[in-house]
Each structure stands twice: as structure tokens, then as C-alpha cells.
Amino acid sequence: MMSLACVQLFFAATLWTLPCSTASVAVSSATQLLHLRDVSMEALLRNRSDSSAPRARRKRFISSKDMTAILDYHNRVRSQVFPPASNMEYMVWDERLAKSAKSWAAQCIWDHGPPHVLQQIGQNLSIISGRYRSIIDLVRSWYDERHHFSYPNRCSGSVCTHYTQMVWAASNKIGCAIRRCSNMYVFGSMWKQANFLVCNYSIKGNWVGEAPYKTGKPCSACPSSYGGSCNKNQCDSRSKSRRNASGVRG
């Protein structure tokens, strides 16, 4: 019989904003999301000293390999949604979102936060005990929720909001951080070791009553700012040279 010590536990959570603007994990029952439009994302996440430092000298909150893997995985998922999306935007990495994710991951608290930042961004969480082979092991369960999601906004499972945040058309920026935590409480149990992943998104998705994207011919309903440019079923205004480089936004 396999020793319990060899069993890896894995959980994921996504942001649900309650009417009182507190956060809870995604295993709770469906609750209406309130989105405060008048809060500036830039004001919440700005860090003057970091933005003025040379990019090459900024501290990373996740390895370049893991960053690329998460970003590529999201864009692959977004390009292959069914039914097809007419307004799916290409997602890029955002260092300010990664910085805010790092700050929260450092708390080693299995919950969403901090509340004042969650008013303006979306957030997916994932956690695993022990080692993992790939960072994608921590995000694949978000994608697997597609089996319970029916367009435009029906969910037949316990939760679909990890997946809908991943494919929210206008959520075109992501930043993540991973932290190894010791003695962390997860659903009432103490985990001696845990790898805690936080991914923040902008703009915030999961608006109650709305579909994550519009259906139709890919790129037929892109925002005007994209100038009609399309790449692999996504609205993408980057030049070909930039498409071949890392999609990092400072």
C-alpha cells in the first residue's frame, strides 16, 4: 500500500469577490462578483523604484522558463476555445502583476488577496505538496474545468472560474509568482511543505452574467486598437519580430 507520505495533494482556487469585497476560495458556492471600475490598476501596482531600475537588474519572481511556459500555455488555451472566439486578445506577461503576485505568495496564506488589489485584478491560485515535474502541473487543472463549462456562462461542476479567467477575452495581461512555503494551512490541514502559485490577471474577468468572450470568426471582433491584426486566432498587434521574442511587458 502506498505510503501516505508519497501522496501529493493538489488544490486550486480562483477569485470570487463577495459584496463586502472580501475574497474566498473557489470551492464556495457561486456568488455575484462586484467590480470596482474607478480604482486605478496603475496606482495599485506601481512601484517607482522598480520601474526606474534597468530591466536586466530587476528581481524575478519566477524563473524565465516557468514564465514562458505559463504564458504559452494560456495563449494556446485561448487560441483553441470552443466555440471559437471572435475577440480573443493575445496575452502578455506583466511585471507589475508578477510583483503583486510575489508579494501575496510570500504570505503563504491559502486564500486570495490582498483585498485592495483584488478590487481591480483577477487571481487564480494553485498549490501542490512535494515536488512537481513542470509548472504546468499546477495550472492544468484550471484548463480541465472546461469539461464542466458550457458557453456562454453555464457551469455543471463545482467551479469553472479558473478556466473562464484563463479565456476571458479582454484579460490580456498576466503575472505569476511561485513560493515554497513551510507549515502552511490548506483547508484546515497543516502542510509541512507546499509550492504555492499565484497568477494575477488584468483586466479582471469573471463578471457575473457575462460570457468570457464573443463567439464568431476568429479576430472578426477585435478591439480597434489592434488594427485588424490577427495571429493564431487571437487579436495581436505585435510585429513578427516581437512575436518571436518574449512577450514580457515591463
Image: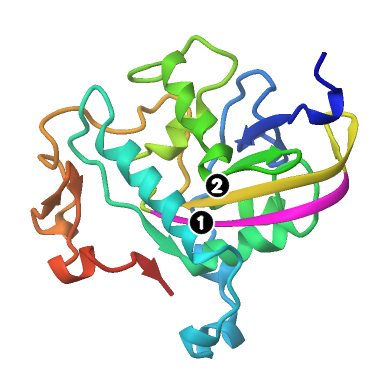
Q: CA distance from mark 2 to mark 1?
A: 6 Å
Label total for image: 2
Q: Quick one: quadrant of the N terminus?
A: top right
Residue 50 image position (x, y, % from top left): 58, 83
Task: Reply above or below: 196 against 13.
Answer: below
Name the element at disc 2: helix
Q: Is residue 40 visible?
A: no
Q: Which quadrant would residue 134 be assigned to in this image?
A: top right
Q: What numbered label is drawn on residue 135?
A: 2
Of residues 68 and 126, which is closer to you in this image? Answer: 68
Question: Residue visible at 89% across and 29% down?
Answer: 188
- From the viewer's perspective, is 85 left or right of 207? left
Q: Earlier in the sequence, mark 2 or mark 1?
A: 1
Residue 204 image position (x, y, % from top left): 47, 46
Residue 150 image position (x, y, % from top left): 37, 14
Question: Residue visible at 68% across and 31% down?
Answer: 11
What residue is disc 1 on? 66
Write the start and end of the magenta stretch as one range.
173-183
Q: What numbered label is drawn on residue 124?
A: none
Of residues 53 and 48, which is closer to you in this image? Answer: 53
Can you name the residue that lies furthest to the front here?
1
Q: Which quadrant would residue 146 be assigned to in this image?
A: top left
What main secondary structure does the magenta stretch of the protein show? strand
